[in-house]
């Protein structure tokens, strides 16, 4: 990894144009504001999942925390409250619109919360008492390498806490989405094309149960890992189901579809949802906390 600083001395901002959130497009239509779509799931998904993780990661007064893939601040904001004015929370996300939503929510009341537009998998600072990430690591281009990098940001003896989807989470939405993708989608040779035969997996295949997740994290370098399944189900409406598509990792399966095509996907997806009479969806997560040796 080379030498890395142990304390960011100023807010980090990308020098390149920022991509839209991987989680985003309009929930009520085929396309829209990705940040709004993401935030529409705060009450149903991001806030309760983040509370469950923070309850287990236990941020403490005066600690330094890295909140990776922080979105609109669902875990970073309560963590900043817990570390108090003597602590620091560096919240990092690729999507500038989501970072701005977190900034608006925090206002001037949390000087200990430092919001950054950046890539958590290349974050250059180390020495944190706690590194945490809610539903972010399965989206990394290289899941194992990205997670290992976050573990290396923890000081020796510090803690890392991660939440990921459990096996079967969001079923049958991936199947319904696969069936709704256009039959005449471009070939798989086009990197921007959705592949109708598959939908991007939400889970980490070798870590989709609590025991497997703990074992996987131990292989990456954590010790004393404790993992558990946090079982939750969500009552669905059509709009909420589509919001889950466009605001989670399922969004990547839509590729670069234009608005008209995306509207068609949405219509077919919602028709399939109604035909299957899907009234609830499993949003169970796995939460693990471990310690970096030292």
Image (tube, rainbow, N blue to C red):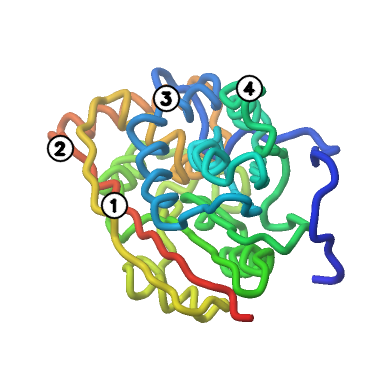
Q: Nearer the viewer, residue 223 or 93?
A: 223
Q: Which residue is mark 1?
A: 284
Q: Nearer the viewer's eye, disc 1 or disc 4?
A: 4
- Under circle 4, the secondary element is loop
Q: Nearer the viewer, residue 202 or 117?
A: 117
In contact (CB < 8 Å): disc 2 and disc 1: no
Q: Earlier in the sequence, mark 3 or mark 4?
A: 3
In contact (CB < 8 Å): disc 3 and disc 4: no
Q: Which mark is residue 107?
A: 4
Distance, label 4 to label 2, CA atoms, is: 44 Å
Distance, label 3 to label 1, CA atoms, is: 19 Å
Q: Earlier in the sequence, mark 2 or mark 3?
A: 3
Q: Nearer the viewer's eye, disc 4 or disc 2?
A: 4
Q: What residue lies at 29% left-to-right and 41% top-to-bottom?
A: 176
Q: Which residue is mark 3?
A: 40
Q: Position of residue 242 (x, y in %)?
A: 36, 30
Q: Which mark is residue 276?
A: 2
* Crowd rating for badge 3 (residues with CA inside 10 Å; few <14, some 14–19, many 20+): some
Q: Nearer the viewer's eye, disc 3 or disc 4?
A: 4
Q: Earlier in the sequence, mark 1 or mark 4?
A: 4
Q: Nearer the viewer, residue 200 or 249?
A: 249
In contact (CB < 8 Å): disc 4 and disc 2: no
- Under circle 1, the secondary element is loop
Q: What residue lies at 84% left-to-right and 60% top-to-bottom?
A: 5
* Crowd rating for badge 1 (residues with CA inside 10 Å; few <14, some 14–19, many 20+): many
Distance, label 2 to label 1, CA atoms, is: 21 Å
Distance, label 3 to label 4, CA atoms, is: 20 Å
- Under circle 3, the secondary element is loop
The reply to whether residue 80 is in sight is yes
- Under circle 2, the secondary element is loop
């Amino acid at each position: 990894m080379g030498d890395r600083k142990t304390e960011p001395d100023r807010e980090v901002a990308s020098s390149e144009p920022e991509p839209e959130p991987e989680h985003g497009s309009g929930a009520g239509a085929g396309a829209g504001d990705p940040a709004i779509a993401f935030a529409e799931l705060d009450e149903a998904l991001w806030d309760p999942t983040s509370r469950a993780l923070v309850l287990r990661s236990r941020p403490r007064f005066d600690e330094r925390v890295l909140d990776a893939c922080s979105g609109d601040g669902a875990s970073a904001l309560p963590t900043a409250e817990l570390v108090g004015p003597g602590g620091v929370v560096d919240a990092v996300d690729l999507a500038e619109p989501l970072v701005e939503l977190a900034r608006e929510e925090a206002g001037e009341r949390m000087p200990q919360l430092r919001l950054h537009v950046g890539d958590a998998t290349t974050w250059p600072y180390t020495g944190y008492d706690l590194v945490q990430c809610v539903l972010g690591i399965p989206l990394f281009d290289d899941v194992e390498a990205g997670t290992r990098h976050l573990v290396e940001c923890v000081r020796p003896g510090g803690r890392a806490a991660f939440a990921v989807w459990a096996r079967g989470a969001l079923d049958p939405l991936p199947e319904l989405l696969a069936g709704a993708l256009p039959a005449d989608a471009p070939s798989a040779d086009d990197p921007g094309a959705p592949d109708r035969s598959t939908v991007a997996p939400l889970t980490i295949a070798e870590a989709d149960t609590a025991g497997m997740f703990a074992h996987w994290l131990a292989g990456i370098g954590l010790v004393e890992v404790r993992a558990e399944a946090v079982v939750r189900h969500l009552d669905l409406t059509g709009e909420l189901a589509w919001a889950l598509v466009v605001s989670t990792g399922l969004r990547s399966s839509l590729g670069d579809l234009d608005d008209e095509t995306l509207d068609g996907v949405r219509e077919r997806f919602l028709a399939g949802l109604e035909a299957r009479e899907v009234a609830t969806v499993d949003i169970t997560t796995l939460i693990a906390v471990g310690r970096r040796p030292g």
